Each structure stands twice: as C-alpha cells, then as structure tokens.
Amino acid sequence: RDSEDWARVDGYFSDLLAPADPVLAEVLATNAAAGLPAHDVSAMQGKMLALLVPLTGARRVLEIGTLGGYSTIWMARALPEGGAITTIEANAHHAEIARANLARAGLRARVDLREGPALEVLPELEGHFDLIFIDADKPNNPAYLEWAMTLSRPGTLLIGDNVVRGGAVTQGDSADANVQGVRRFLEMIAADPRLEATALQTVGEKGWDGFVMAVVRG
Ligand code: DHB
Ligand code: MG
C-alpha cells in the first residue's frame, strides 16, 4: 500500500461525505495560485474538525496557524449562532489570502483573524476557548501548549496537527526541529495531570501523519 492508495480512498470518502463545495474548491485553488504550501488539512480531516465543534458544544474556537483559512472555514461553518473563531497567522501573505478566502466564504463576521506571531498574539487573548486547534510552526508547539492551557477551561478539547510526520516522531535523536517540537509537545501533554489524551495516526491525501487530542480535566 502506498500514498496513491491512501489518496484514492480519501477521494472516495470525500466524494461521498463532503461532496462538491465550490467555496472550498475555490479556496484551495486560490491558495495554490498564491503559492501557499499545501499544508491544509484534508477535506475529511476538515470535516472531522467541523463535527467536533457541535460535539464539544464549542462556541469559542481558537486556531493557531491559519494558513489560507481552509480549516478555519470548516470549523467556522460548524459554529452555532453567536459562536466565533479566533485564528492566528504569522505570515502576512498567508493572512491576506486567508482574509480574502474568509470573505468569499461569507464568514468574516464569525472569524477574528489576528495577524502576527502567535506568541505575540496569544497574550492579548482572553479565554476561555472551548476547542483549540494547534497547527502552526511545530518548534513552538510546547509554548503553544502552555498558552492553550492558560486559555482553556475544564472540558476544553485541544487538538494538535502533524504529530506523526511520516513516522519521524519516534526518532528521539532527530535533528529536525519540527520533530523535536512535536515530541516535547507530546511529552508535556503526557506529563500534565490536567490533560487526558490520545493520538491518532492518519493516512490519506496528506500522506502519513496524525493528530493528538487532549481534554482538559474537570
Ligand atoms: C507541515 C505543517 C502542517 O501544518 C501540515 O499540516 C503539514 C506539513 C510542515 O511544516 O511541514
Ligand atoms: Mg497541519
């Protein structure tokens, strides 16, 4: 089995479960035309994030790492009336594209896009958030976890993207700062008595990767 099989199955699932969505298709085309890295979550992963919004009863969502706003759109669409998502993007070009994409999706009123390095923006935010998606520069994941804890409440769901990295996560001696950031992030989650967590590997159109999911204890 290889990545072509994984992508084919993802395509099959997406066609069935997330059929033709002109706005999201336009967003992905815009991102590609603007030269953004194709690091968006897949459609099925985006839909999982969207399902988690009502499942957790989230009204306030925090996303660290907007990129072009693809995952932002999935989660924002799933918010209840009066709900809102704050999303942070350090890269000015990415933020500009995201603003256009969010406007195209008709979601600007529900999305507070903060442009700047997350470690500068996070201290300006007021909790609590009900769902926090960490999907930015991986070397800073340990610091993002600390902020996520500060901005959470008992019951908040934390989700971290890209914790498998094609299997590289198990390489304790890796010279890759992304791997080391993810490993420290996972170790901090494991050691924190306030958190109960699992990690799930995924294969699909985005290759071999996965999510960590942690709930802040009551
Ligand atoms: C990378 C980052 C991501 O958030 C992602 O989903 C895939 C890859 C990266 O930096 O390589
Ligand atoms: Mg990611």
Image (cartoon, rainbow, N blue to C red):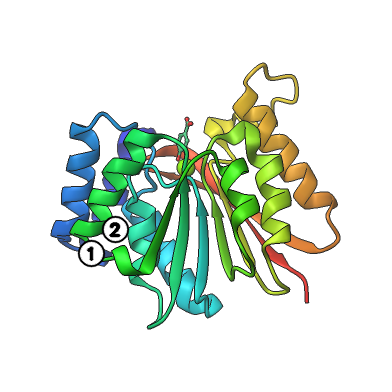
Quadrant of the frame with the C terminus: bottom right
In this picture, residue 52 sits left or right of residue 121: left
> Where residue 66 sits in the image (x, y, percent)?
42, 47
Comparing 10 with 158, the one in front is 158
What residue sits right under mark 1 in the picture? Answer: 16
Q: Residue furthest bottom?
A: 81
Q: Quadrant of residue 139?
A: top right
> Where residue 179 sits in the image (x, y, percent)?
64, 29
In this picture, residue 33 sits left or right of residue 154: left
- Visible residue check, residue 172: yes
Q: Secondary structure at mark 1?
A: helix
Name the amino acid type tagged 1.
Leu
Label 2, label 1: how far apart the Cα atoms are = 5 Å
Whether residues under marks 2 and 1 lie with C-beta atoms below 8 angstroms apart, the answer is: yes
Name the amino acid type tagged 2.
Phe
- Residue 13, numbered label: 2
**Quick check: 180 above or below 50?**
above
